Every structure is written in C-alpha cells, then in structure tokens.
Amino acid sequence: MRGKTADEIISRDGNNLDIIRLLAAISVIIYHSFALNPQWALTDPIKNLLGYVTTGGLAVKIFFFISGILVTNSILTRKSAYQFIVSRVLRIFPALVFVVFCSGFIIGPIFTSLPIKDYFSSSQLYSYVFNNIILSTQYFLPEVLTGNKYGINGSLWTIYYEVIAYIVLLLLYLVGFHKSTFISSIICMIIIIEPVTPLKGVLFATSSHNAIYLLAPCFALGALVALNKKCYKSNIKIPAMLFLLQFLLPGEEIKPTLMCFSLCLAALHLSSLDLVKKIKIKHDISYGVYLWGFPIQQIFSQYFSFGFVINVTISVIVTMIIALASWLFIEKPSMNLAKRIAPSKYLPNCTKTMHNQ
C-alpha cells in the first residue's frame, strides 16, 4: 500500500486525529496519577524504561505536533490573519476560562480548609483566576487540596507555550515567509534542531528540561509537514528509523528529541490508517480532558483510597463527562461564533479536524 501524502491525510475524512489527541489526553491523566498517589509506590513506566522521556511528556509533544500541522495548514489555506486570530482565541480561551473559574469558585470553596468567608476574601483566589486567564500560570488556591505540591491544576502551564507558538506562526505569516516554502521550511528546521546544537537556549529552548524545550521543535515539525504536505508521504519507516537512532546516537538532548519526533510522525501515520479512521468520535473532547484531568484526579487521589486501576478509570470517566459538557456548552458554541465573526472564503478546502482546531 502506497504511503499517503500529508495533504491527503489532513484532507476531509483523511485522518482520525481526534482519537489520537484523546488518547494523548488520557495518557496525561495516567502519567499524573503516579505523582498524585505516592502511596502506590508506582512510577511512570516510560520514564523507568528510557529514563529521558515520560508518558505525559510524549503525550504533550503529540498535541503540539498535531497543532503545528493543523493550524499551519489552516492559516496557509484560509490566508487570513484575522480569521486565524479569532479562531485561535475562541478555541483556547473559553474552555480555559471555564476550568479556571470552576476551579476557583466551585472546586475551591468545596475543598478549602478555610472558612468560606476567608476563602473568598483571599487575594490568592482572584490572582489565581486572573493570572491563569492571562497565561501567567498560578497553581495554588487558598488552602485547597494541600496534600500535594502540584497545586490544583498542574496541566495549565503548557497553554502559554501553545499560544506563543501561535503568535510566532502568525508573525512569520505576516512578515511573508509563507510565500516561500523553502525559507519557511528552513526556519522550521532551525527550530527543530535547536535543542541538539549550540543554538540551544538562543531561540525557544528556554529550559534545560526536555518537557519544555521540545515543545517548539515538535510544533515546528508539524508546521514543516504542513508546509510540505504534498511532498511528505507518511509511512512507518521514518518513525521506526528515528526510534532506533535514539539508541545508537549519544547525547542527552538528541535521544529525547528523536523519541518525540518518532512518536509524533508515527501518530500521524496511525491516524491515517483505515482501521483507525473507522473509530468514530462524535465530539472532540480532548482539550477538555486535558484541562480537567488534573483537578478531577487530584480530588479522587486525596479523598479516596483507590488503587491504580480504579483511580485512573474513575478519573478518566468523570473527566470525560465534564469535558463533554465543556465541548457542548463552551467550546463548540465558541468555535461556531468564530466562524460567524470571521467566516473563511476557503471553507470547502478545510478539514473536519481543522474545524476542531
């Protein structure tokens, strides 16, 4: 069977990236369960096996890679900076505001150890809400779920980096780099290889931890695929080669880089398989699952003595129910509003998955 081009994959009905993102979001919940339940004496199996990547870290990189593909393809196809800004803002912030407000004004009052009056008079509550909405991540509410060191929602930090990636992409588009696929591809390549060159720390690798410094390269890898979507043919050989290379090449930076790139490209290929495309997901709840997973599983971890299987199962089910509500009443209406505010002239060419971006 011939490999499909990226153009074919991201065309209408050419992929099932929704299931890939949902599995990635659930993987983050599983990963966080180990940190939130030290009494289990269990640790992340991927971290144990490889040492330089984690289950949650890999899942987040897949999110950034898929986002890089879809939003880059979207702005190149629709050719509208205004439409891009409106769609990005109304895709990211309504669900984020929803989880932040619910955390501060519903979960917080229920689980705080402070008197309700003291809780609502605390400036920490209002700084939590305000700072997280402006993407200055704050983790703690006044005396809420204090049994761990991670705060109420340890997943919010990645949203800042996602938005920065959108801003950089938009600026490059406005400058006009998109008019040359060659120049745009070179820029992507520079970002991709930054962590394994002396440039590390100059552009986007602002942290020594690969959980952070590999976010931009994975987004750039997705953008590179979108830029060359008619040329790149998805197959399992390239991911397999990258996977094997990580064991052959030395270097603290190159091993996690190759592992992340391998998994990202494998996820794209997997999404294009006919068997995977048959798995129908009516609602794209992956973003909601990511946003709500941490606070929900933290509640179960602190107030119930469940084992690993029951804890994760219940956390995933409850999170998916809340994520579905977020999708139906917050995210989907916001996306429909974006389409009305900034209709695209190129909607016939847009994919189903792009609409969910």
Image: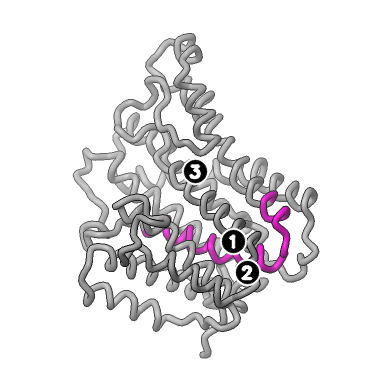
Residue 171 image offset from top left, x and y in percent? 60, 56
| Nearest to N terminus: mark 2 or mark 3 | 2
Q: Residues within 10 Å of mark 2 (few under 14, many from 20)?
A: some
Q: Nearer the viewer, residue 256 or 116?
A: 256
Mark seen at residue 270: none
Residues marked 1 and 2 touching at CB (< 8 Å):
yes
Q: From what the image shows, is residue 257 above or below residue 327?
A: below
- Look at mark 1 in the image and give the residue it sits on: 172
Residue at mark 1 to residue at mark 2: CA–CA distance: 7 Å
Q: Which residues are magenta?
A: 58-86
Q: Dot 2: what SS?
A: helix
Name the image quarter holding the C terminus. bottom right
Q: Residues within 10 Å of mark 1 (few under 14, many from 20)?
A: some
Q: Quadrant of residue 10?
A: bottom right
Residues marked 2 and 3 touching at CB (< 8 Å):
no
Q: Dot 3: what SS?
A: helix
Q: Nearer the viewer, mark 1 or mark 3?
A: 1
- Look at mark 2 in the image and give the residue it sits on: 178
Residue 123 image offset from top left, x and y in percent? 47, 17
- Look at mark 3 in the image and give the residue it sits on: 291
Q: Can residue 166 be seen from the camera position used here?
A: yes
